Image: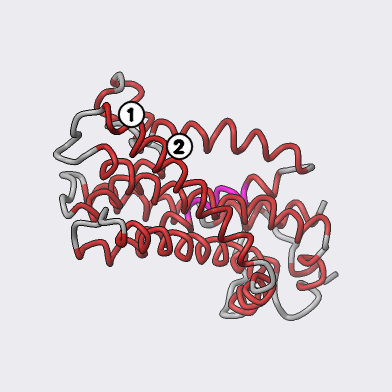
Amino acid sequence: MSRHKIKSSPLLFRPEISSRFLVVLQRNLLVYTKYWRSSMMFNFVEPMLYLAALGVGLGAYIPRIEGMSYLEFIAPGLLASSTMWATSFECTYGSFIRLQVQKSYHAIITTPVSLDEVVLGDIAFGAFKSILYGSVILLVFLLLGLVSSPLALFVPLVMLLSGLVFAQLSMIWTSLAPNFEIFAYYFTLLLTPMFLFSGIFFPVETLPLMARYLAWLMPLFHTVQLCRGLVSGQLPAGFIFNLLALLLFVLVLFLPPLLLMRRRLIQ
């Protein structure tokens, strides 16, 4: 292993990044072609089940929300959450397998590719899956008549930002995880509360003030707001704020997974 590639002081940390991270992305895409059908089915079926059970079943008893039927209200939220789940599964279990089981990270950094580029390649792959799965579900919603505006064409851009955020969060957790079991805490304590309280199933304005503040700190909340506004054509008043919040998350979370993964491999 080329230890000079991963040794770094936190105070003098400088990422070693070039276009070589695309080679790692290409490698992951090549492997993905071997199992894309089963992966796609898992990430596609779950939001459809929520849509049918809650949007159609429960929705029959719920009045219109913000001028939309309950089915129309939750569809963009489920679209947003699908990108979170797809990316998070890839950059936790998938990345941990490559790191700890297959030792792919160790093998790749013996080449001219740096560890930072390997991590960035995994993050890019997570963001790709976010766009892919989200776009497929968006197409299905279009066929079901749940897309009301041509602004929905910009939804993949939101998926890209959301995918990067959750890929970075997941890679941070992966860099600290000693085993597979620890990922249960990540999904249960971090992602599930986001799924429930980010405005997918009800407006966050119905929550107590403190809970609303917490919702605004969740990247999924901003993704839901943007997707709902673009799909319905009714952009929220804080549209720019939601967009800037996602961009800020991407910037703030850029360095931590690179630094933490370096520390892990040094140890």
Tag in front: 2 or 1: 2
Q: Which mark is residue 213?
A: 1
Q: Quadrant of residue 215?
A: top left
Q: Please give the name of the residue rendered at 55% of the width and 48% of the height, measured from the top-left corner.
A: 169
Say above or below: 146 vs 55: below
Q: Is residue 186 left or right of residue 78?
A: right
Q: Which mark is residue 165?
A: none
Q: Quadrant of residue 181?
A: top right
Q: Nearer the viewer, residue 69 or 159?
A: 69
Q: Position of residue 148 (x, y in %)?
A: 19, 56
Query: Disc 2 and disc 1: Cα gap in Å?
Result: 16 Å
Examine the structure image and report whether residue 121 is included in the region drawn in magenta. no
Residue at far top of view: 208
Q: Is residue 147 left or right of residue 132?
A: left
* Three-letter amino acid code of the residue under disc 2: Phe
Q: Quadrant of the N terminus?
A: bottom right
Q: Please give the name of the residue rendered at 73% of the width and 53% of the height, measured from the top-left corner.
A: 96
Residue 163 in view of the camera: yes
* Three-letter amino acid code of the residue under disc 1: Tyr
Say above or below: 151 vs 213: below
Examine the structure image and report whether residue 166 is included in the region drawn in magenta. yes
Q: Say whether disc 2 or disc 1 marks the residue closer to the N-terminus.
A: 2
Secondary-structure class at tag 2 = helix
Q: Is residue 210 left or right of residue 180?
A: left
Q: Nearer the viewer, residue 19 or 26?
A: 26
Q: Quadrant of residue 176?
A: top right
Mark 1 neighbour class, 10 Å CA radius: few under 14, some 14 to 19, many 20 or more:
few
Secondary-structure class at tag 1 = helix
Magenta stretch, residue numbers:
165-172
Residue 11 in view of the camera: no
Q: Please give the name of the residue rendered at 31% of the width and 62% of the height, measured from the top-left corner.
A: 143
